[in-house]
Image: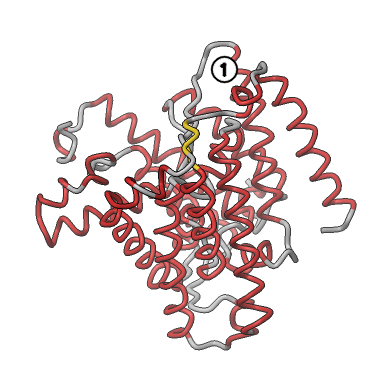
Amino acid sequence: MNTTKPMNIHPKDRSHLVWGLAFGIVFGFLLQKGGATKYDVIIGQLLLTDFTVLKIMLTAVLTGMIGIHAMKTLGWVELYPKSGSVGKNIIGGLIFGAGFAVLGYCPGTIAGAIGNGYLDAVVGGLAGILIGAGVFAALYPRLNHGILNKGNFGDLTLPRLLRVNDWIVVIPMSVLIFLFLYWLERAGL
Amino acid sequence: MHFFAETSWSPYAVGIGIGILSWFSFLVSRKPIACSTSFAKASGMIEKLFRGKKVDLKPYYQKEKLALDWQMMLVLGIVIGSLISALLSGDFQWQWVPSIWANVFGMNPVLRVIVALVGGICLGFGARWADGCTSGHGISGTLQLAVSSWISAIFFFIGGILMAQFIFKLIG
């Protein structure tokens, strides 16, 4: 609880924070190399003329999904699925999506855009995200008693929804993602 | 080292890299890669500078404590990592107006910044509403096969594609 002052950070917490920074540096490096820190690449994806963003995301999901589930099967890691609801994920998703297209960056890639020197990201986008998040925090008690819990389904995962072993979902999902990426390449997208 | 100085890498190489990064993030930090909560915390911390400790009492900041944490360090790291990559390849540039925007709406930086601000408000608000963003839901959540994340990621793109069409096909 006493972590508000940087001076009081326990050495173990400090190494935890340093790992966060290190993972962020690698993530930012990769996003920039992939072009995902650029407005043009993100808008190109939403205009369906440039599929770079989807290729990066789906390859990351494919690689990550197989590795994480293998480590879960071995008992090395546990999962942290977020709890959701119809009101939360569908309406929130649409609001986020609209903002994504108007801004042309998302919360992760805007950090990368700032590192890339893009001033519309710093002066406009970053300020906007901070304001939008603050407005949400102010409205949270009211939203939480209403719309955010409409159609609550909890921290469900697809294997638990279907009552099957993880790999019964992981394997077909991997094949689907692979085929979709293959099709994108074949279509010249 | 030549590899690190290239302007861009194959999206598949980048995706595999992010996927492997997520393994280590689960293994070492016991956390999925995610970004947007950090902006809510930063927003609360800034508000706290003006309004004092009572900001901590807001229910949302009871849930998401206002303290520097792993994810904020991750977001800070993204800025640094992107900067290193851009400097190594010579791709770093100060830019107000991106080219697709400029082709349709002109080079006026004020217009672009105002639109970015409005988009940012919507994005920041929507990310908290959906409880995640393109990384937390779109990559980390979907790879865990979370139902909430698949629904969110699909609706991020539905909303984004519709709005992009509206901006560039109807207005532009």
* Closer to the camera in the image, B156 or A7: B156
Give residue B98's position: percent from left, percent from top: 57, 75
Q: Specify the quadrant of the image occupied by residue B64.
A: top left
Say which of A125 and B56 sits in front. Answer: B56
Left or right of residue A177, residue B139 in this image: left
- Front residue of A64 and A85: A85
Expressed as whole percent of the image width and height from the top left, the position of residue B68 reads 26, 42
The chain letter for the residue carrying disc 1 is A
> Residue B112, percent across and down?
48, 80
- Quarter of the image for residue A43 reads bottom right
Q: Amino acid at mark 1?
A: Lys
Residue B63 locus on image (x, y percent): 27, 39
- Which one is nearer the viewer's eye here, B12 or A162? A162
Q: What residue is drawn where x is 52% and y is 28%?
A: B24
Q: Read off the residue under disc 1.
A: A72
Residue at 55%, 40% in the rendered image: B149
B109 to A1, vertically: above or below: below
- Judge left or right: residue A4 versus residue A14: left
Residue A42 occupies quadrant: bottom right
Q: Count all numbered tags in the image, as a single digit.
A: 1
Quadrant assignment for the N terminus of chain A: top left
The single residue placed furthest to the top in the displayed view is A74
Q: Is residue A51 above or below residue A74?
A: below
Residue at horizontal 58 percent and vertical 41 percent from the top: B139
Which element type, helix, strand or loop, lies under badge 1? helix
- What's the image's color scheme? secondary structure
How packed mark 1 is, by other alpha carbons closer than 10 Å (few <14, some 14-19, many 20 or more), is some
For the C terminus of chain A, the quadrant is bottom right
